[in-house]
Each structure stands twice: as C-alpha cells, then as structure tokens.
Amino acid sequence: MAACTEKKSTDEELRVVLSWFSCWTEHQKYEFMDILANKVTPNKLSSLNDALESLSLASPDVFHCQLRMFNKWFLQWTDQQRNLFVNRLEEIDYQSVQYFYEKVSQTAQQE
C-alpha cells in the first residue's frame, strides 16, 4: 500500500512541475533546462547544489522557490520517472528540451 502512495506522490510532483513549466517565461524555461542538464550530468551535481543553496541568501521569487521544490523532488525520482518527465516536457515545449539535449551532449563531450 505504501508503494502506491509513493507512486501517487511522485506522479503529483511530476504534474506540478510540468504545470509550472508550462507557465514559465521562455527565459525561465531555458534557465530550468540548464539546471536539469546539470542534474543529469554526474560531475555537475555538486555545482548545482551549491547554486541552489545560494538562492537562500536572498528573498527568492516564486520561480526560484519552484526550482527548490523541483530539486528536492527530482532527487527522489527513479531514472524511469526522470525520463518520463523529460518526455512530457518535450510534449509541452519541444525547443526547450532540444536545448536540454544539446547541453547534456556538450557536457558529455567535455569529459
């Protein structure tokens, strides 16, 4: 029974972040894609966490609060859920997700 509750919670998290994404400006979407690319690139994870922690030094706006929530949730998602999330993002904004794929590819080439 607990597994069903956890799955439902993750599904809700996915829907919430997708809803936020659909309301963000183009600039915010690309900022998010930079963050997402860093999250899926193992060597970049610590710099992302440092960047998100620095947000607490100033009064965050709604967008940055949403990014914080996303960061907490994303860490709990399985690879399958993360892939589903990216696929759903692509349905909402194909161009932004192509930018994400380019960023991931560039990072992989640098290593």
Image (cartoon, helix red, strand yellow):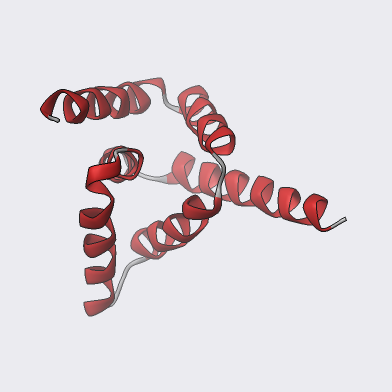
Residue 24 appears in the picture as rendered: yes
In the rendered image, residue 85, in percent from the top left (x then y), is placed at 53, 35
Question: In the image, residue 57 lies at what x, y percent?
Answer: 22, 78
In which quadrant is the N terminus drawn?
A: bottom right
Q: Residue at x 14, y 30 (%)?
A: 111
Q: Quadrant of residue 31?
A: top left
Residue at coordinates 27% horizontally, 69% vertically from top-left? 53
Q: Residue 76 at what x, y percent from top left? A: 54, 54
Residue plotted at (42% across, 26% down): 93
Task: Kindly give the residue lying farthest to the right in the view shown.
Answer: 1
x, y percent for residue 14: 59, 45
In the image, residue 73 above or below residue 35: below
Is 80 positioned to the left or the right of 102 in the image? Answer: right
Q: Residue at x 11, y 28 (%)?
A: 110
Q: Compare residues 42 and 87 and report the one nearer the observer.
A: 42
Q: Is residue 100 above or below residue 61?
A: above
**Viewed as shown, does residue 5 lie left or right of 42?**
right
